[in-house]
Image (spheres, coloured by chain):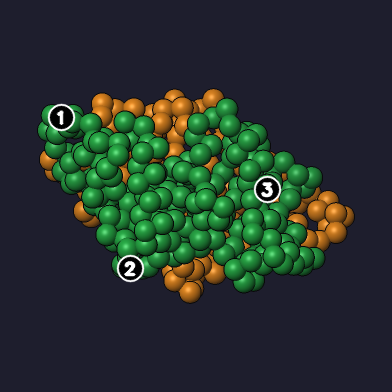
Chain colours: A orange, B green
Amino acid sequence: MCESLPGIKIAPWRSPLARALHRNRSQPYSRYFQLATVQADGRPANRTVVFRGFLGDTNLLKMITDTRSQKLDHILHHPWAEICWYFTITREQFRIAGELTLIDGNHLDSELQKARQLTWQDLSDNARVQFAWPHPGKPRGDQQAFSPPLPDPNHALPCFCLLLLDPVKVDHLELRGEPQNRWCYLRENPHTWSTTAINP
Amino acid sequence: MCESLPGIKIAPWRSPLARALHRNRSQPYSRYFQLATVQADGRPANRTVVFRGFLGDTNLLKMITDTRSQKLDHILHHPWAEICWYFTITREQFRIAGELTLIDGNHLDSELQKARQLTWQDLSDNARVQFAWPHPGKPRGDQQAFSPPLPDPNHALPCFCLLLLDPVKVDHLELRGEPQNRWCYLRENPHTWSTTAINP
């Protein structure tokens, strides 16, 4: 049942995930998933997040967030997360568990800081301007506060964060199988994953 | 900003949720949401679950699960959960936080036991037979093990659980607003909810 894949840099779950992204590409929401984290009080939190691709040639998933969002406190307190990604056309689910890293404007790693700036540049004006909106989650501000000048595409606002998820476990379920197909991928060490077919 | 609604039995977020369910009814997956829980080791778990309606005239959301699923351990250890429910046609999200109650075959409340049996009866043969499949998450069984006799629609299998979520907080985000609209509903006491418009 168990298959080791030593030395492979691209994890074995990347291939079925790439196929799902391709087959569901007609729906823009196929790039949205739900990110679960744990709050300081130990209760779970769950919200929809946009997938921003992988970091270079790594298996790290890119997302973005605002330093002012509640998510940030959760992550600083407890960096563990599980993504649940359901593809509606092919009827399959990926659950991706791993550790989160926040790259804010003060992060000292110059490569990651560069990745943060590039992610900012790649955003649409619409996505960028949301970081200039009033404080998320606070009582609703005036309509005018939601029409700030467009931020500079070449300089990320201080509240803009790149968020990376480093997966250690992936559970892939295909509802269309006969009966259904399900696989569990476990990271044994940084470059080795095991793959096991399991019961749905 | 804050509005109290004393004496109302149906919570104020039920109306926008009913509207979302109606406007997205052409897509069967509009009745799927992601349920986040916390594992015994303190890490989050997240999976897609089918909405089975509300329990009678309460605000409790019905789901089903299998006593053999990992979810069960998580819930027994930590009954708190957050649902993330994204509607693709109307582009809106409901985050519903609350406490879970498991109704298995040994649950002593006769009304809830009746609700469990009725939920079992309402399932399709396809949904019911999955509770007679081999142990979920274990190494893949023989193909034959996935073709058991169809279970009796009038007698729920012992591993069948009704799962109820009792909401205490609902966060509703409309991406289509100008700029976007977001509301926070908080349960102040069993029959009173506050409603606050907040920044997206």
Residue at mark 2: B77
At x 40%, y 56%, the residue is B112
For the N terminus of chain A, the quadrant is top left
Amino acid beneath label 1? Gln
Q: Quadrant of residue B123?
A: top left
Q: Farthest residue to the front: give it.
A: B110
Choose between B79 and B101: the one closer to the eye. Answer: B101
Instruction: Name the spot of residue B23 as percent of width and height, x first.
Output: 65, 34
How far apart in space, not on screen, are marks 1 and 2 (Cα)?
33 Å
Q: Chain of mark 3?
A: B
Residue at mark 3: B15
Tag 1's secondary structure? helix
Choose between A176 and A78: the one closer to the eye. Answer: A176
At x 15%, y 29%, the residue is B143
Q: Is residue B71 visible?
A: no
Instruction: Name the spot of residue A196 as percent of width and height, x first.
Output: 19, 42
At x 85%, y 59%, the residue is A142
As drawn, is A97 to the left or to the right of A22? Answer: left
Q: Residues within 10 Å of mark 3 (few under 14, many from 20)?
A: few
